[in-house]
């Protein structure tokens, strides 16, 4: 099972404009560019905060109260958490680089603000490089935000432009333009009693302090007018498998379809999608029953995926720990909570069946729409 939480707030903070808030920008960006006389002329007030480079870091926070209640109620069990961000633009990027994701310290709440980077007017009401809220003002203990730099609470995501697919180690590419980092250790710490003040995303200390140009990586923010805003993905295994008197299907001769997929779902629905399977080419016989109605069950290693019909983007990926297809005496099924999908969009399903060394993927041709 997968659901997605959208940010409650996000912003980028910059060391070259240390009091500027950019809480309403449509992008979040990670910048590391050396300052030269030709590229940047520093004012006297800026020299106290700027070393030899223009740096930026991103702050992002999610309201997890609903997830916390669902875990306490047993509705969500043993979840994993993934931070998903979509790349808008990459400029001057080295062949490979790593971004670091940290929890922001207890007692360091921050305000998103309403500023923009290129407004022409620097707004100081909200988080900036020097302050968690410039209106009060409330300053960070250290410029660039207060964050916890502990190995077990640090998540990483690496950009490798010579690869063209996802791996389990959170690798993303120029082509896919996605970041997916496992932040379970951080989120579980919040559920254990620590204060949730969100994540800080930045480059390593060594890269921020050296003299190299690492360019710009821009991600869509929660204020984007696209469908590519950041999310926190919650994934857990809700599957159960009991076949009763059903007969196993033959992976080499099967047709897969959905029995009860509706044309549209309300975004508050919790749907159970029933999956049917039968022989693609049933043998001729003199039985008085229709061979196309003989139900069989899929192998235990069968999984579902959800695709955006328009962009072809994978919303819910095949995953052995959270998208397993269940089975009971009536056949196969899986559950979807529609509140994890953007409303007023169309989606389609895929099914992957693994049996030994054989793996087949089936597209379900029927689209469904999620509405408000």
Image (cartoon, helix red, strand yellow):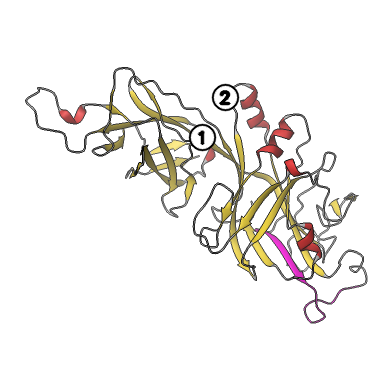
Indicate the position of residue 205 as horizontal and vertical percent values.
Answer: 79, 58
Residue furthest to the left in view is: 286
Report the side of 181 relative to 121 (left or right).
left
296 relative to 4, above or below: above
Lower sequence index among marks 1 and 2: 2
Indicate the position of residue 216 as horizontal and vertical percent values.
Answer: 67, 66
Is-magenta flag for residue 31? Answer: yes
Which residues are the magenta region?
Answer: 26-43
Q: Name the residue at 56% across, 64% down.
A: 161
Is-magenta flag for residue 139? Answer: no
Indicate the position of residue 267 as horizontal and vertical percent values.
Answer: 50, 37
Q: Name the residue at 85% across, 60% down.
A: 19
Q: Which residue is mark 2?
A: 75
- Choose mark 1 or mark 2, whichever is in front: 1
Report the side of 151 relative to 313 (left or right).
right
**In this view of the protein, can residue 133 be seen by the observer?**
no
Q: Quadrant of residue 369?
A: top left
Q: Count neighbours of disc 1 (C-alpha within 10 A) and say few if under 14, some if 14 to 19, many if 20 or more.
A: some
Residues at discs 1 and 2 in contact (Cβ within 8 Å):
no
Q: Which residue is mark 1?
A: 321
Q: Secondary structure at mark 2?
A: loop
Q: Name the residue at 81% across, 47% down.
A: 147
């Amino acid at each position: 099972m997968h659901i997605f939480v959208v940010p409650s707030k996000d912003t980028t903070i910059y060391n070259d404009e240390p009091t500027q808030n950019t809480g309403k920008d449509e992008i979040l960006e990670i910048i590391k560019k050396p300052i030269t006389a030709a590229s940047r002329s520093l004012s006297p007030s800026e020299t106290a905060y700027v070393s030899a480079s223009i740096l930026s870091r991103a702050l992002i926070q999610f309201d997890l109260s609903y997830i916390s209640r669902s875990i306490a109620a047993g509705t969500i069990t043993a979840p994993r958490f993934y931070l998903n961000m979509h790349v808008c633009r990459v400029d001057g990027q080295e062949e490979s680089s790593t971004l670091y994701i940290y929890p922001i310290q207890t007692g360091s709440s921050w305000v998103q603000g309403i500023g923009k980077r290129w407004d022409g007017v620097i707004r100081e009401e909200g988080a900036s490089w020097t302050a968690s809220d410039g209106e009060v003002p409330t300053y960070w203990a250290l410029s660039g935000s207060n964050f916890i730099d502990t190995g077990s609470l640090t998540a990483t995501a690496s950009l490798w432009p010579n690869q063209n697919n996802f791996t389990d180690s959170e690798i993303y590419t120029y082509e896919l333009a996605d970041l997916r980092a496992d932040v379970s250790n951080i989120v579980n710490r919040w559920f254990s009693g620590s204060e949730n003040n969100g994540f800080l995303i930045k480059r390593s200390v060594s890269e921020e302090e050296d003299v190299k140009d690492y360019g710009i990586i821009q991600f869509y923010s929660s204020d984007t007018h696209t469908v590519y805003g950041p999310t926190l993905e919650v994934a857990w295994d809700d599957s159960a498998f009991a076949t009763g008197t059903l007969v196993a299907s033959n992976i080499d001769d099967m047709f897969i379809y959905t029995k009860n997929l509706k044309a549209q779902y309300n975004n508050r629905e919790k749907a159970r999608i029933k999956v049917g399977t039968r022989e693609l080419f049933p043998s001729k016989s003199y039985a008085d029953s229709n061979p196309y109605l003989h139900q069989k069950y899929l192998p235990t290693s069968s999984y579902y995926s959800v695709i955006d019909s328009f962009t072809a983007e994978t919303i819910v990926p095949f995953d052995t720990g959270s998208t397993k297809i269940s089975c009971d005496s009536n056949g196969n099924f899986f559950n979807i909570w529609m509140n994890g999908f953007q409303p007023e969009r169309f989606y389609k399903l895929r099914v992957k069946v693994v049996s030994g060394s054989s793996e087949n993927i089936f597209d379900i041709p029927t689209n469904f729409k999620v509405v408000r």
